[in-house]
Amino acid sequence: FLLIRPQQQKAKEMRSMLAALKRGDRVVLGGGIVGVIQKVSMVADKDGKQVPGNEVDVEIAPNVKVAGSGTGAAMLYEL
């Protein structure tokens, strides 16, 4: 129990960080690439309300965008 609890807390923090991603956020992708989120896909939940989806477009250089999953964003990048 004592070993599982910190892992669950870390996973909960990661889920909340991914749910809060928005356009303009600087992120570090899983491979260590730093970029700026340009677009977050929106999907309808079970109540028909629009919520952030799992796909994001990240600009890694001027006019160079990559598409990927939100889970690929390892962390927010703050200067």
Image: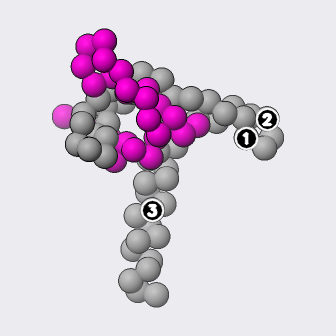
Q: Please give left or right for residue 52 compared with residue 46 in the image.
A: left
Q: CA distance from mark 1 to mark 2?
A: 5 Å
Q: Residue at x 73, y 40 (%)?
A: 45
**Residue 45 shows which numbered tag?**
1
Residue tagged 3: 11
The answer to whether the residues at label 1 and label 2 have Cβ atoms under 8 Å apart is: yes
Q: Which contiguous range is marked in magenta?
A: 53-79
Q: In the picture, which quadrant includes the C terminus?
A: top left
> Measuring 72% from the left and 35% from the top, which residue is drawn there?
44
Q: Which residue shows up at 24% across the image and 34% down it? A: 34
Quick one: SS at disc 1?
A: loop
Q: Which numbered dot is residue 48?
A: 2
SS at badge 2: loop
Residue 15 on image: x %, y %: 49, 53
- Work out how far the residue at label 3 is from the one at label 1, CA to CA, in angstroms: 21 Å
- Most distant residue in the right direction: 47
- Depicted 69 relative to depicted 37: above or below: below
Q: Nearer the viewer, residue 2 or 28?
A: 28
Per the image, is 63 magenta? yes
